[in-house]
Image (tube, helix red, strand yellow):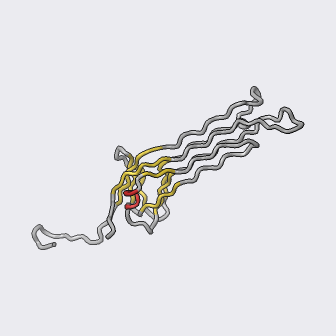
């Protein structure tokens, strides 16, 4: 027998951004090749999406932690890091997203409706992106940012199919 869960607390964490790379181009007859460090990749987002095939929040009851992919660090040769994969969580139609204080963040109604719960961190800049007139060959790169982390409450609005109206003790059972 399937259980029906209509309220669940979900802990979500977006992916971290990848670090930038500090690299200097080296070639046989080019002693001063210049900086060629790539940027880090963006961290993945955690997204809630309405799916008509899902009817309960039972999956989130047994797996209350959701984490998106991290961005990859940049590499030498002006190669940027790969972006982290977004984590798309399927929720039923009529799901209300609340923060930990009970404030309504989003009411997900309609198939395909999406809401980004936690945004991924930005990737750090490599030393090739940090070149300026004053600093021709920076020997450093910037670190990637942390992704958002938060607790959200998912509540499922259920609509009654039938309503009984009448006076008290009139035999409505």
Q: Is residue 22 left or right of residue 153?
A: right
| Residue most extreme to the left | 169
Give the left or right position of residue 80, taking residue 48 as reference: right
| Left-right relation of 121 to 102 | right
Place of residue 51 in the rendered image (x, y in percent of width and height, measured from the top left): 46, 65
Residue at image coords 42%, 53%: 106
Instruction: Look at the image and tell me in which quarter the C terminus lies.
Output: bottom left
Residue 17 placed where, x, y %? 59, 43
Figure label count: 0
| Residue 42 image position (x, y, % from top left) | 60, 46
Q: Which x, y percent locates residue 115?
A: 48, 54
| Image quadrant containing the N terminus | bottom left
Height in image: 114 above or below 129?
Answer: below
What residue is drawn where x is 10% and y is 69%?
169
Choose between 28 and 161: the one closer to the eye.
28
29, above or below 170, in the image = above
Q: Looking at the image, which residue sits at the far top?
A: 134
Please, is residue 143 above or below residue 169 in the view? above
**Residue at image coords 26%, 72%:** 162
Q: Residue furthest right?
A: 29
Q: Nearer the viewer, residue 24 or 100?
A: 24
């Amino acid at each position: 027998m399937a259980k029906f869960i209509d309220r669940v607390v979900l802990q979500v964490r977006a992916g971290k951004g990848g670090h930038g790379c500090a690299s200097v181009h080296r070639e046989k007859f080019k002693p001063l090749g210049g900086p060629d460090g790539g940027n880090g990749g963006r961290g993945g987002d955690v997204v809630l999406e309405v799916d008509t095939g899902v009817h309960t929040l039972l999956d989130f009851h047994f797996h209350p932690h959701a984490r998106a992919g991290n961005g990859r660090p940049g590499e030498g040769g002006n190669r940027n890091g790969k972006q982290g994969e977004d984590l798309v969580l399927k929720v039923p139609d009529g799901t209300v997203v609340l923060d930990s204080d009970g404030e309504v963040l989003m009411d997900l109604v309609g198939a395909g409706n999406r809401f980004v719960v936690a945004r991924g961190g930005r990737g750090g800049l490599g030393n090739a992106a940090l070149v300026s007139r004053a600093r021709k060959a920076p020997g450093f790169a910037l670190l990637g940012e942390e992704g958002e982390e938060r607790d959200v409450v998912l509540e499922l609005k259920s609509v009654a199919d039938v309503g009984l109206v009448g006076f008290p003790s009139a035999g409505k059972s």
